[in-house]
Image (cartoon, coloured by chain):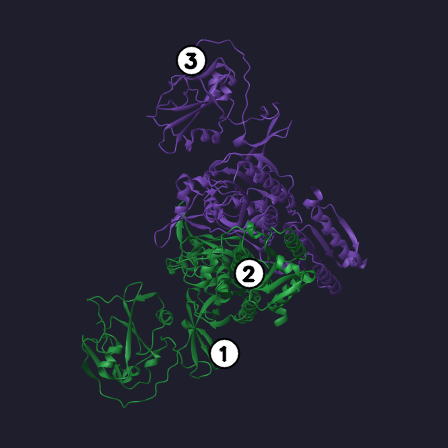
Chain colours: A purple, B green
Amino acid sequence: MKVKSLVGLRFKERPADCLIDSHALMVRGGYMKYVANGIYSEFPILRRVTKKIEQIIREEMDKIDGQEVLFPVVMPAELWEESGRYTSIGSELVRFSDRNRSNLVLGMTHEEAAVHLVREYGRSYQQYPFMIYQIQRKFRDEARPRAGMIRVREFTMKDAYSFHTSQEDLEDYYQKCYDAYNRIFQRAGVPEVVTVASDSGMMGGSVSHEYMLLNEVGEDSIVLCTACDYRSNMEAAKNIVHNEPREQTQPLECVETPDCKTIEEVCAFLKSDITGSCKAVVYQKNADDSFVVAFVRGDYEVNETKLRNLVGEEIHPADITADAPLVAGYIGPYQISDQVTYYLDLSLQGIDSLVAGANKEGCHYIGLNLARDLGQAEYVDIAKVKEGGICPCCGKSALTIKRGIEVGNIFQLGTKYTKSMNMQYVDADGSLHYPVMGCYGIGVGRLAASICEAKHDEYGPIWPISIAPWEVHLCCIRPDDTETKAVADDLYEKLQEAGAEVIYDDREGVRAGQMFADADLIGVPIRVVVSPRNLKENKIEVTTRDKTVQESVDLAAGVDYVLGLIRELKNIHNVEKLN
Amino acid sequence: MKVKSLVGLRFKERPADCLIDSHALMVRGGYMKYVANGIYSEFPILRRVTKKIEQIIREEMDKIDGQEVLFPVVMPAELWEESGRYTSIGSELVRFSDRNRSNLVLGMTHEEAAVHLVREYGRSYQQYPFMIYQIQRKFRDEARPRAGMIRVREFTMKDAYSFHTSQEDLEDYYQKCYDAYNRIFQRAGVPEVVTVASDSGMMGGSVSHEYMLLNEVGEDSIVLCTACDYRSNMEAAKNIVHNEPREQTQPLECVETPDCKTIEEVCAFLKSDITGSCKAVVYQKNADDSFVVAFVRGDYEVNETKLRNLVGEEIHPADITADAPLVAGYIGPYQISDQVTYYLDLSLQGIDSLVAGANKEGCHYIGLNLARDLGQAEYVDIAKVKEGGICPCCGKSALTIKRGIEVGNIFQLGTKYTKSMNMQYVDADGSLHYPVMGCYGIGVGRLAASICEAKHDEYGPIWPISIAPWEVHLCCIRPDDTETKAVADDLYEKLQEAGAEVIYDDREGVRAGQMFADADLIGVPIRVVVSPRNLKENKIEVTTRDKTVQESVDLAAGVDYVLGLIRELKNIHNVEKLN
């Protein structure tokens, strides 16, 4: 391919609407084009990258006995009604009607389609285990698409579904898939991707992991222990708090705290420590708008995912109107209205004497003892882990919090879908059982963008050779010089004959600086420069995009040198070599 | 891959709802599963076939300098409003709203997205010509999905779009694509696909061709000349009629034709030849329900596509109510209401004396002379070609009509989309112009099903090796026999090591007949059978699915023999060898 024929424009200016580097570079480099909110077209360069990622994924899925299938993008509502998700999923699920007024949905994930496809096939225990996967477009009507290809509404995803006759067999296979995912990220050039325990969310099931590329632009918070191997998504991270007994029990006393609306203001006014206070965070259930209050220690934040799992239904931040059974700013667990559901976080356990709202305008209690004053107090885990928190694995106060981009996830689904959709198999003894399922996803475009985010400099992406659009970027400086052009043309031909993927810049009238800037944006790992000046000494210039190699190579040895360099770079991502 | 692990069930009974063989076989063979009307999932066997077809298409598109891109499935309505198709296309185009009430459509074709992607790139004449293509899912809300994968609502399609600075350049490229398509069908094992001139329909543009696989289950009528190379889709076929002067001009006379509602009844009643009659076929414009009458010679049928193109807007068969300005059954061109638009077909030209409706209940004219009685008569081509009709190319009465399945199409679009979407380029002299476009489509799933329809017997598909799910189907008869199993296992390993794609049936307790029935349904071109009986003579059995090869081969020579046979079969589809 020649640069002059490559469809897509490259330009210098950073687009104003691109908040993260990968997005800006992929727009500037002619990788993608905005079509609508969270919807993009892929130019040829990006399509080359995504095809390579797809191929790596395919190979690794096939290695663990995956069989590629294809589910439709458009599915009938009935299928989603069977699983219950037609109603349980909110507006991310696009629903529409066809010309015959049949209700349809756009696939945002394909558990239903997977169960539907193999419901008959999986009637005998002898067919198990098996795994099917597809690489297909999906649509999720995200409220806030952002960060270019990282959070979009339409995307290409590899989604895999495994079926088993026992939890043990699922766990065995889950481990195989866990390893296959590590190989995929290693081969794609990001072996630094880490796995974290995660919350299963709307997928159902219990055990699940996310694959995280640690990066400050990530929208996920990841909890890591600096003392042991513990890693978890913030949503799933267990929060441990030890409250040392500090005060003698005090009598319960109502005091005036005028104009103190936040717990910080109350504690400042009362000159008490925030770690001895009880903060209220109020939500409402989506279904009936009834109030749910989460009480956490004043210096903690509520983990909404944990709270939502506890409540068992969708909730949203409350709008406390005048007729609500709550006094905004003065809400406390003691004598709270019985129209309200409340939860006490574990961070409140063991504090003898609390500052808490008095459920009365302008008043707080001091000396509140939950066990004594509420009669009985049950504590649940609904707070977010904090930097320096206690590791649930090794017990040390060594937790740290980082940002990450989720590039893959794997779930042990259990029987959620097989039960709801009535998929059963006949066991050897003739008895009927529901198979247990696992599901495994990787977003192709997001992975491409994440790798770009992790591997770039100010001039462009630095693609790992395994997913780079081409392996070699050949620049002919001064193609108007007959000899230079002939040498470059010859290299182009010979490298391609030897199987190298080459993009060739032989544009006339383009300055060397412009050629190099374009090459930087295309991000190909090996650059070969042929110029009249180098040719005087019978040399060509070979550099790598990451600047680790910058060699002047004898022209006669040029092809072999470049081919050797390709092999060397490929070895870095070679799973067999490293594992 | 082992048959025992292959996801998908095979069964014997022909499903009642499958009207054509390919559909029945692909359901019976575990290729596809019905999800909703016109929506299917692909099992692993079919996905292997469609992936091979996709790869052949990719290679041929790349050979003619195509660059693969990816457009979204979901597009904003605005994009389709730009081209005018948001309103001009009927209910086949799925329209829906997202959570923010933005109007979206599901892509059924991607001209708009293509122009959108390259509108800026194509600003300079120096960038031309270029071609971009994608392989992507599409959704078209067909009124009547039918014939399994042949006419569906959701499908995978390769769609390509080329851009040019002149009609001549488009025509050059169009010819390249025309040839590439022939190579694709040849490589996919159906070199018998023919091209026919076609009507461009909703795509706009002028010249277009369809690639037809002649087959009686096809829903398209194709006009072929048995004397020359003329081929056309019925919709686009020019109809030529020579009316020999037979009668002297007669005076116009109104006669009673009681209870004669059809032209056949009228002619029988009047004892006149139907070739001297004028038949009326009535339509209404979709926009305002006003009437459009097509007059053709009594023995011809109206070609609605030609009529629609002439009218320039959508029409539908008329509902003639009591208050209509037409007398159903007695409609004629003479003294017809001026509220009605009418057209006279060329088949009426040159008849001096016609039988035609009198626009009066129970009455017809005889002796109608259009030129004389209407003052002036203009004739247009709105009738369907008939068997034995005159070839517009060689002039012989040698036309024949066959059925065909459309497996691809190519269009010269002209500037329809670039003009409406305001894509312009700056020419060398600084002037602005609209680029001319071509577009080129192939439905992947439809091609797979069509090939199955063209290549099958009662037992299953007979896949060409180039797109077969595997190349070799290895059957181990009596895998419980240790020696037989060891020999078959060894063959499986050696063939795979040599690069052959092998599906291996080593199921225990399955009769040979069942194994062969399954193999027939999987349709792999080469079958290798290892059985205790053959092994006694140190032989294995090698047959082809089409029965042209049935050999007993020495075990020691088995691998080489099979590899040779693979090469031989592949050569049949080798474009370079044949062209």
> Would residue A566 appear left or right of A398 to someone viewing this image?
right
Of label 1 and label 2, which has the lower sequence position?
A: 2
Q: CA distance from mark 1 to mark 3?
A: 98 Å
Q: Are marks 2 and 3 on the same chain?
A: no
Q: Nearer the viewer, mark 1 or mark 3?
A: 1
Give the residue at mark 1.
B229
Q: Amino acid at mark 1?
A: Asp
Mark 1 nearby-residue class (10 Å; few <14, some 14–19, many ≥20): few
Q: Residue furthest bottom?
A: B248
Q: Which image quadrant for residue A211?
A: top right
Viewer-proximal residue among A84 and B210: A84
x, y (%) of residue A290? 36, 29
Measuring from the top left, give residue B511's x and y in whole percent. Answer: 54, 55
Which of pointers 2 and 3 indicates the residue nearer the eye?
Answer: 2
In terms of depth relative to the viewer, which is nearer, A392 or A48? A392
Q: CA distance from mark 2 to mark 3?
A: 74 Å
Residue type highlighted by circle 3: Asp
Say which quadrant the C terminus of chain A sits in. Answer: top right
Q: Chain of mark 2?
A: B
